[in-house]
């Protein structure tokens, strides 16, 4: 999977605890027992899967970041693209002739010390295989296909098996990073019988060959195996070249990773400090608070705002934990299913938008730990359009809009209705959210109370996380409360907003038409930054005015981090990097 939602930017300097080490005396940190060098991270729900090609869940991606690696990364301090598996940033040149004239040739070389668990080197052939999985029409990777649609071929250097050139058919302004941020898979694990070996990336990327690929028995066999549970969650089959090995997964309980012995990155001084990382899945926040009090969890992110404030004010807990609120590159929204005959009506969507009291949500539910936002770009980004006019909380205006559009309560049940194409439709909707997310549940309830006052009924439907994800992907909802985690680099709106992403991508609300598609396609290939930012602002206003989402807020992260460790706190989700957690004291001095 593309590393869309898990790039970490430094938000605040790491505050190191130190004391004077006079003479031969050891510091207090060295004398104190900080426990085992094992990190326990809270997760609210299970990951959807641990196959980076197929996974879409942000929680899964954070875990995969410990298992897998990519060619390029984002430096936490400079916020610039830096090499990870590549020896340097790629050379990028224009394709001057041939089928893909006007596209780009992007040449990477893999560092020579990068190794798989069997000791073999990470080679260009592994990347060739990985790109095939990213674009293969039979794999469960619709999102990745839409993001990498400009990639058309790969050429491996015959004199250097670690060097290769990617060929694109357009000058996508994110080409370098998008192609370089793919988690590489070991071909010998994921395709041991070489079912994809004789199928070229060029062949897979040509849409004319899609039917032939789907009809080919070898392709079908490979897809069935690759999409199966084995490569999503079984030990020995979830394998990368990163510092940690997948150890176990007890569904709805925990996922365990173990630091690899003799990992190649240790010699390269790539930080990977904990001996073990456990992702403890606790869906009940009262149990999370109990775990904090008995110090059985080291890291909690996105804690319920009220609990965060209460715990932060507890002097005893402050002896054991840091409470951090970095800005977060994410946003929360209410998605409206535009395929629904009632919600396809712009005035119904606008009326719902006027039923949302964002000020009350931010003040009463988030205790001020968020900022309002009005479009599909994070507020922190410089091309966020601050001129967009928010939909004010105004129930009288909501009533007026519905009256003007012919929605009236004809049967006296308190719910507005209307005859559309001979059928009586009622403004009675369900609104879904992921079970255990108390803030989203309260958002639903507040909206429901306000909507009732204007003649709209909203019934809340909590869903287990994986069910929630599956149903939103399948457009099986009226409304839902969701969130997107962004990158520090510029956005590519195609995955979420292009009509080609309605089925398979992330356009769950079925937004868009020819005009919005043309604007998206245009800004993706605009290399001039000033012109591109103007196009982004035009796009933001287009989405804002259409109201496929009711944009709510950009939250501050609410992090609780054990003082057993020294670790950085970053703006991008999840707000930390597990491998960087360094146990304080003597346990971590003899390495």
Image: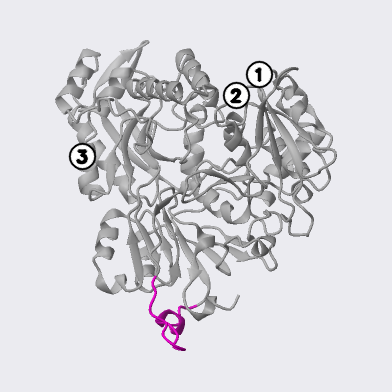
- Name the quadrant of the C terminus: bottom right
Alpha carbons under labels 3 and 1: distance apart: 49 Å
The local secondary structure at tag 1 comes to loop
Of the pair 170 and 36, the residue shown nearer to us: 170
The local secondary structure at tag 3 comes to helix
Q: Which of marks 3 and 2 is nearer the N terminus?
A: 2
Determine which quarter of the picture holds residue 3: top right
From this view, report whether residue 208 is shown above or below residue 107. Answer: above
Give the magenta-colored segment's residue range: 17-35
Instruction: Say whether residue 157 is left or right of residue 256.
Output: right
Of the pair 164 and 50, the residue shown nearer to us: 164
List x then y, in percent, for residue 541. Answer: 35, 22
Residue at 40 percent across and 61 percent down: it is 14
Residue at 37 percent across and 10 percent down: it is 421
Q: Is residue 436 visible?
A: yes
- Name the quadrant of the N terminus: top right
Q: Are circles 1 and 2 on residues that touch, CB within 8 Å?
A: yes
Magenta stretch holds residue 373:
no
Q: Which of marks 3 and 1 is nearer the N terminus?
A: 1
Instruction: Report the number of numbered marks.
Output: 3
Task: Identify residue for label 2.
Answer: 171
Q: Are circles 3 and 2 on residues that touch, CB within 8 Å?
A: no
The extreme bottom residue here reads: 24
Determine which quarter of the picture holds residue 370: top left
Task: Identify residue for label 3.
Answer: 359
The extreme front residue here reads: 23
């Amino acid at each position: 999977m593309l590393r869309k939602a898990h790039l970490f930017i430094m938000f605040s300097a790491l505050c190191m605890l130190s004391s004077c080490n006079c003479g031969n005396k050891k510091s207090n940190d060295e004398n104190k027992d900080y426990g085992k060098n094992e990190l326990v991270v809270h997760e609210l729900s299970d990951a959807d899967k641990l196959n980076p090609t197929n996974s879409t869940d942000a929680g899964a991606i954070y875990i995969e970041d410990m298992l897998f690696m990519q060619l390029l990364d984002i430096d936490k301090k400079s916020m610039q693209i830096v090499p990870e598996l590549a020896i340097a940033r790629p050379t990028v040149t224009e394709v001057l002739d041939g089928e893909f004239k006007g596209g780009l040739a992007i040449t990477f070389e893999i560092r020579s010390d990068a190794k798989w668990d069997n000791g073999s080197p990470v080679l260009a052939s592994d990347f060739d295989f990985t790109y095939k999985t990213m674009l293969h029409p039979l794999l469960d990777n619709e999102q990745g296909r839409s993001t990498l649609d400009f990639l058309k071929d790969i050429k491996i250097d015959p004199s250097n098996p670690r060097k290769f050139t990617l060929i694109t058919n357009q000058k996508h302004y994110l080409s370098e990073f998008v192609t370089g941020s793919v988690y590489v898979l070991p071909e010998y694990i994921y395709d041991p019988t070489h079912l994809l070996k004789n199928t070229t990336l060029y062949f897979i990327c040509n849409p004319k060959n899609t039917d032939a690929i789907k009809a080919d028995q070898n392709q079908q066999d490979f897809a069935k195996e690759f999409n199966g549970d084995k490569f999503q969650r079984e030990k020995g089959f979830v394998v990368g070249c990163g510092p940690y090995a997948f150890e176990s997964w007890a569904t709805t309980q925990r996922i365990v990773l173990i630091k690899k012995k003799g990992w190649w990155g240790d010699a390269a001084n790539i930080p990977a400090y904990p001996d073990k990382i456990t992702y403890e899945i606790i869906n009940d926040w009262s149990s999370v608070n109990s775990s904090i009090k008995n110090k059985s969890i080291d890291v909690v992110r996105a804690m319920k705002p009220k609990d965060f404030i209460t715990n932060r004010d507890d002097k005893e807990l402050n002896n054991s934990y840091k409470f951090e609120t970095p800005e977060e590159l994410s946003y929360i929204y209410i998605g409206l299913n535009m395929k629904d005959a009632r919600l396809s009506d712009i005035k119904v969507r606008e009326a719902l938008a006027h039923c949302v009291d964002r000020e009350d949500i931010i003040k009463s539910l988030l205790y001020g730990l968020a900022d309002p936002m009005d479009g599909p770009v994070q507020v922190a980004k410089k091309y966020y359009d601050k001129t967009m006019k928010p939909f004010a909380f105004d129930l009288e205006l909501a009533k007026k809009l519905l009256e003007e559009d012919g929605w009236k309560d004809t049967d006296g049940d308190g719910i507005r209705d209307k005859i559309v194409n001979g059928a009586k439709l009622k403004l009675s909707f369900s609104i879904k959210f992921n079970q255990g997310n108390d803030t989203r549940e309260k958002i639903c309830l507040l909206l429901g109370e306000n909507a009732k006052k204007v003649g709209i009924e909203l019934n809340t439907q909590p869903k287990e996380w994986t069910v929630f994800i599956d149903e939103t992907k399948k457009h099986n909802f009226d409304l839902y409360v969701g969130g997107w985690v962004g990158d520090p680099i510029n956005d590519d709106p195609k995955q979420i907003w292009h009509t080609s992403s309605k089925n398979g991508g992330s356009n769950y609300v079925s937004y868009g038409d020819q005009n919005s598609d043309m604007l998206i396609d245009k800004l993706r290939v605009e290399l001039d930054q000033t012109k591109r930012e103007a196009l982004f602002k035009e796009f933001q206003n287009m989405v804002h005015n259409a109201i496929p989402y009711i944009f709510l807020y950009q939250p501050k992260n609410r992090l609780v981090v054990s003082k057993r460790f020294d670790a950085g706190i970053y703006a991008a989700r999840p707000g930390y990097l597990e491998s960087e957690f360094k146990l304080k004291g003597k346990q971590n001095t003899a390495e």
